[in-house]
Amino acid sequence: MDADKKRLQKELMTLQLNPPVGIKVNGDHGSSLTTWYVEMEGATGTLYEGEKFQLLFKFTNRYPFDSPEVVFTGTNIPVHPHVYSNGHICLSILTEDWSPALSVESVCLSIVSMLSSCKEKKRPPDNTFYVKTCSKNPKKTRWWYHDDKV
Amino acid sequence: MASTSESEGQKEGDDPEDANKSNPSQDGTFECNICLDTAHDAVVSMCGHLFCWPCLHQWLETRPNRQTCPVCKAGISKEKVVPLYGRGNAKQEDPRTKVPPRPQGQRTEPENNGPFQSFNWGGDGGFQMSFGIGAFPFGLFASTVNLGGPRLPGAQPGTPQFEEEQFLSKLFLWVAILFIFWLLVA
């Protein structure tokens, strides 16, 4: 088994045996393990309490040296200043601040935490333009990380 | 365009109890932070984080101009990681046959604190001193006393280099004499 598959297998096992609060990995991933769907709930006491979201993870065979491609998918995309209506997330650890010591679990927790610190539900100011012009793969976007408050 | 830099949730390896819960048969303390397996050809960074050397090497190659520790983002480099040698790894194949080789362990000589050890005349036993008047570059009145110190060996007589050195020393002698003469006249 290749190193990337082995690590993904390990992560999957850990997440299924011992999932963090509000995070659930869908069981069926086929044999390839390159596409994961992760269910997550908005944390209690935040603007997203009671909402359910779905994240789509795609891994290349360079994982974990290469960051996974992570987008919100499904019917409910959170309304958040760093989440575009097509599901793309502006989060530095998904591109330039990625580290191989991060994992699916830590990415999920970061996203829950990003949602939790939101004070006002609104789309990014350039949402319409971005959604019209962006690539399908959010990793091809040149993100400009400037706002670390939310 | 809007974004955030979330501080990552560092989970694995931080909490041995957690690791034990998910993996009851194994102790997570010696797992590589990259492949999450028990570290082989292990190295540890100055910040104390454990990796397989092949894993860490691949990460350093991924970002050659921004080499940071995957766990804590401290600066890290090939020279600044320490290999760990456990006991009883004789059966293992030599890690150097695999690419990339592990960095060498560093061994410093014990310090010798005997009396007068650090007080060394001229470095190699000779006694050297020089004194002079005048600011650079007019240090022509400087004289040099050089007793017993081994000098750089000059060229052997007869070789072209010897001739050249003789010529140069004569030339500089004449320049010095002319300069002194000019100073006296002026």
Image: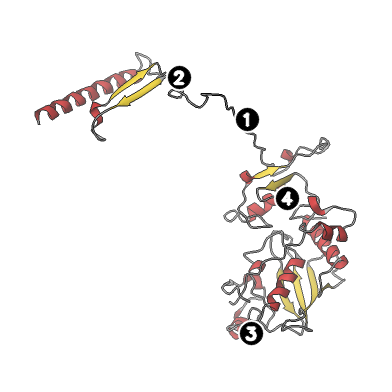
The answer to whether B151 appears left or right of A88 in the picture is left
User: Which subunit holds the residue at mark 4?
Assistant: B
Instruction: Give how far apart the Cα atoms at labels 4 and 3 are.
Output: 40 Å
Give amino acid for label 4.
Phe
Where does label 2 land, which residue? B125
Query: Quick one: label 4, few (<14), some, or many (20+) residues within 10 Å?
Result: many
The tag earlier along the polypeptide, 4 or 2, is: 4
Which residue appears farthest toward the top when viewing the image?
Answer: B157
Which residue appears farthest toward the left when viewing the image?
Answer: B185
Residue positioned 74% across, 70% down in the render: A109
Task: List x then y, in percent, for residue B183.
Answer: 14, 29
Where does label 3 land, which residue? A123
Instruction: Give how far apart the Cα atoms at labels 4 and 2 are.
Output: 48 Å
Which numbered circle lies on residue B159? none
Where does label 1 land, which residue? B110
Query: Quick one: label 2, few (<14), some, or many (20+) residues within 10 Å?
Result: few
B132 or A55, which lies in front?
B132
The tag earlier along the polypeptide, 4 or 1, is: 4
Q: Nearer the viewer, mark 4 or mark 2?
A: 2
